[in-house]
Each structure stands twice: as structure tokens, then as C-alpha cells.
Amino acid sequence: MSEEHGQRREIRSAVAYQKLMGRYYAGAKSAGKDGRKVAWITSGGPVELLHCFDVIPVYPENHGAMCGATRMSVPLCEVAEERGFSRDLCSYARGDIGSAITKGGPIGGLPRPDMLICCTNICGTVLKWYEELSRLFGCPLFILDTPFVRGTSSEHAIAYVEEQMREYVAFLETHTGKRFDEALFEEVAAKSIRSISLWREILACSEHRPAPMNCFDAFIHMAPVVTLRGTDEINVYYEQLLAEMRERVQAGISAVPEERHRLLWDNIPIWYEMSALSGLLASLGACLVADTYTSAWTFEQVDVADPMRTFALAYTEIFLNVNLERMVDKAVALAERYSAGGMIMHSNRSCKPYSLGQYDNAKAFTRRTGLPVLILEADHTDSRQYGRAQAEERIRAFVETLV
Amino acid sequence: MYVAGVDIGSLTAKAVVLGEDRRAVLSRALVYTRWDAAAAGWAALGEALADLGAARSDLARVVSTGYGRRKLDGSDANFTEIVCHARGARFLEPATRTVVDVGGQDSKAMALGPDGKVADFVMNEKCAAGTGRFLEVMAHALGVDLAEFGALAVGVADPARISSTCTVFAESEVVSHVASGRPRAEIVAGIHEAIAARVASLARRVGVRDAVMMTGGVALNVGVVGALERMLGHSIAVHPDAQFAGAIGAALLS
Ligand code: SF4
């Protein structure tokens, strides 16, 4: 018996998305000519302040995802491995170092940084990775250290991070020669809150049954909230996407042609397998309705009245910087809100902070929700760590056991 | 009329034929898969039918499972090995709550609910440790026929230690045991312990509950079954049709 491969329904706004991201990368690449500065920043870093100083933020992790999705990561990782970087190091870091050296990748590498902004709220890897970049490019590095949160963040932890936010401002003043404009910061903060809440509303559309978009769509359309939050263009774009999703909900249009199973996804996508996995799940009538990853950019703590402190709090409490119990709470809450019937966890060889504890999380999740969990071993961009036949077999078996 | 289940694995293809009431296995056959999964599946089914003096036109339904299941053009449906082995194991032993299946290129453990539904399952990681392939490589390294491998280790008091989980490295450990003059039975027993250790950790991950049933070709190896029983502290049921559990499950799901 042959199986038809279900088709993912294309999102109209994807055209606007392509333009937006195209403009963004073109702008970043021509920054030098335009007399603007470029900062490389970690995905969980406070980007809003860069916009206040007219510095263009560039995200090696987003670039890493692009390299992964275009299946260009492995040769870049090999460049870093030949230089002695261990294969146990996150493949975003290896790929980025490889690309920085060779200018390889789908867009010919990232524009040279004038400065580096490293926030440790996502992992400890970024610390050494950015130090390496700083040596490689000979440019200044700012490190924002966010203490790990068990339960809730302590008063002194927030004060410590807020103090560093002020040092960050001073660092930017020094390296751009511009003065900090508090009013502008409030404006950017307001726009950032808008970006984040639009994104939250877009994701919430999938609470509807059938879901108008799935995680594979979200993995793509999340790029603006990661890279451009706090700017006007992203808000215009997200308003359009939100309208389209609401239209779909009204019309009963689903992301997956026949949605029979609603599942959660945990961890970073397996970028090089996006289309194969999306086709497979669609053919099985399974829709990934929500995930712990894209929803990491939906924090609610920021308040325009006190942006410095509330950003300090929001960036300290992001998903990867909290204890396992809070991670499970989040997965359980998503399962309830999105009426999910199970969860697929990607045990990501690269990302230790995301993957460590997953077996315990899976058990706790099942205990609290009664829902089954499938753990898939892979790596977000190093496809050498992935066995397609085995992974697909596990997914098929998992979906069969759901009925 | 009859119904049939065909399980096309990496090493062997198995077929069983049941009556339409699906109450008993009337015939069974096994052939080597080699390079053509579909041909092997049909060949196994052909043999099973011939045993009954029946023909393909006597089959109401054919359901396939195993790695090659989707290659079997003309089958009415296909299901993954997980659900098929679970169904097959329950058929062979209705009290089954834990199924350990060790096949040619993968091994898996399943926890079944009281109703026989699969509650959880895990499969081996992307490597040959803890699979039939591991045994095959080791039997070859020792120049022993795979069919006699299990019995060779019975009664060994001091199994050789094979500590590497990697098949290639484990093979070189075996070679060095041979070179140091270790008796062959002790090495064979060590190999059984190594494979059992990998499989036991899979079984523990889903939680071991009685009755435990082992399915797949490796279930016929008394050495591995014995080592696994000791490690899990549970007795393990093995049915003479263990190797056909997947095909039986497929036929039951037809
Ligand atoms: S280890 Fe994880 S959090 Fe850190 S850079 Fe890699 S993917 Fe990002």
C-alpha cells in the first residue's frame, strides 16, 4: 500500500516574509557601506537596546538555522572540527565558526561584526563561542550574565542583571559614539511588546481545531520576532500574518489537510528535515499545534513604564534559564491550551540546556497529563547525527499507538 | 478464506496464515530477505500458503509490517512493528505487559496497558549494539554458526567482559579475548551479557511488568534470554512462534 504524502498548505504572507527577511539581511550585509554598525547577538539577548543605537543586530543562531534548512551546515561544521573544535560542541557554534572562516552558507556568511553581544540566558556554550569570535574578529565583546532561575528570580538577581543592562548601555555609547536616548528606548520597548504580543496571538490561533498553522510554519515565521522585534516593519508583517490566520480559523482552513492528531513539539527544529517531517506528519493526519521553542519569544514581563528592569527580568526568566519543573509546567500548560494528544521531544545532541532532563520531563509530563511522549534523537543542524529511517519509523509507530 | 500477516525485516521475511476467525496460526514460513523486500515477502507468503494447499485468491486480507512493509504492493494495509509485535505477543501470551523484541537491525521494548494497548515504547539508538546484527558479527568473528551460538554459553560461570557498546570496538575486544586464549564458551557468554545489558536498559525505560515476553529472532537464543532474565530479575516467556509475532500481529490487525 502506498501512502500519499500530505501537503502543507502554503501561507500567503510567506511572500511578505521573504521580502522582510531579504531586506533585513541585505541591509545587514551593506551596513559597512551605509555607515552603520553591526552587532552579532545571541538569540536570547536584549536586542532592543541595539535598535536604540541604530546598530543592526545579526543572529548567528538564525543564520545557523538557515544553513541547516539549506543543508549546508555539515561542511561548515567540518571546518571548525578540522580546527580542533569538538563534535560535542553545539553545531550552531561549529557551523558559525566555519562560516566566519570560509564565508560559506546560503548568503555567503554574515557581515563582519563591529561588536559582539553575548547573553548567557540560553547556555554556557555561547560564552566560549563569542569569546572565540571576539578573538577571530578582534572586536569588543559584551557579556550579559543572567543567573539561573529556580522557581522565581530573586530580587538581587534582577538587580544584578539590571545593573548589567546599564553597563550594556555604556558599552554601546562607547562603541557607537552616540548618547543613550531614554525616550527612544521606551518607544522601542513599546514596539517590542507589540511584536511579542502579536506573535503570541498568531501562535494562539492554533488553539482552534483544526489548527490554521502548525509548528513547521511557526519555525519559519518566528525569524522576525527573534531578529527584528522592536521595529515597525515586523509589526506590520505580523499584523498581516495574524489577519491571515484569523481568516483561516473563520473559514475552517487547516494547516494539515486532515487533522486527526494534535501534538506538541519540544526543542529546536531539526532544520534539515523540516520538509520531510512536515510531509510525513501531514500524511499521518498529525499536526504539531504548539511547541516550547517558538513560544519562548512570548514573554509577558516587559512594562514600558520601567523597561530596564522589566527587560532584565524577562531576559533572565526565558525558557532555557529556568528549572525543569518550570519547563514541565509550560509543556503541561501548552497541552491543555492547545488540546494536544501527545508530545514529540527532539533530544538535540547540540543543545544541552534544552535536552538535558528531557527523559525526566517526559515522565513528569506523562504523569501529569496522561499523554504519551516520543523522544527522537537528532541534532538541529548536524545531519550526521540523524537516522531518517529510524526516526520516521518511530513517528509512524507513535502515531499508530495514539489511535 | 484466510487472512495473512507478512513481516519483512532486514534479515528475514516472515509470513503467517490464519483462518478468517483469526483464532489460530494455520501455517508459517520464513525466508531470507536479501535485496528484494517485496519478493521475499511474497515468497514467504507463498510458502505458507503452499503448506495449506491454498492460493493467494483464498486470502481475504493481507497486512504487512517490518522495515519492508511498504514495499509489499498488493497488501491491504500496513502497520509499524510496534503495534504488530504488541498484538502478536498478546496473542501468544495473553498476560503480556512487557514485550522485548530483538530483531536483525533494531531492538525495542514496549509497555502494554491491561487492555493490551501500547502505553509506551522505546527503540534502540542509531546503532547496532543490542541487535541481532551484533550477534551475527560476533558469531562470525568466532567462527560459530548463529543457530548454535546460544547453546554454546549455557552453564558458563565466568563470562568474558565485553565492555564496549560499539559493535566494531566490541568485535576487537572479542578478537583480543580470543588472542589471550579465553575459552570460546566464556566469550560467547560475555557477548550474550553485552547484548542483554543493552536490551535490559531499554526494557527498564518503559518499566518491566509481568508477564514479559520476548519476540523476534533473538528470542530463540537461550543465551541472551537467560542473561536478560538474570539482569531484569523477571522470567521471560518465549513462544516457539516468537519470531512470527510481528506477522501474527499484522494478520490480527487485518
Ligand atoms: S547550545 Fe543550545 S542554546 Fe546554546 S547556542 Fe547551541 S542551540 Fe543555542
Image (cartoon, grey):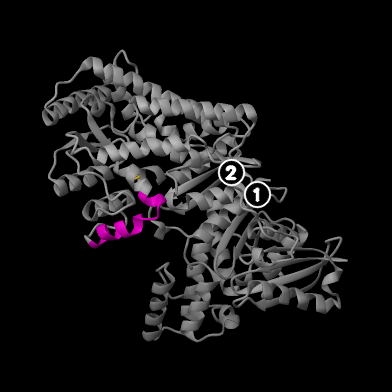
**Local crowd size for mark 2, using a 10 Å CA cut-off: few (<14), some (14–19), many (≥20):** many
In the image, B251 versus B199, the foreground residue is: B251
Q: Is residue A58 visible?
A: no
Q: Secondary structure at mark 1?
A: helix
x, y percentage for residue A110?
26, 45
Going 34% across and 31% down the picture, which residue do you hit?
Answer: A228
Q: Quadrant of residue A193?
A: top left
Q: Secondary structure at mark 2?
A: loop
x, y percentage for residue A370?
60, 38
Label 1 belongs to which residue?
A401
> Which range is magenta?
A67-82
Amino acid under disc 1: Thr
Label 2 belongs to which residue?
A372
In the image, A187 versus A88, the foreground residue is: A187
Q: Is residue B219 left or right of residue A173?
A: right
Going 60% across and 32% down the picture, which residue do you hit?
Answer: A339
In the image, A199 versus A320, the foreground residue is: A199
Q: Is residue A164 left or right of residue A397?
A: left
Q: Is residue B90 above or below residue B4?
A: above
x, y percentage for residue B136?
53, 77
Look at the numbered discs 1 and 2 and tell me whether their residues touch, using CB distance below 8 Å: yes
Q: Magenta segment: does it hold A334?
A: no
Going 28% across and 32% down the picture, which residue do you hit?
Answer: A147
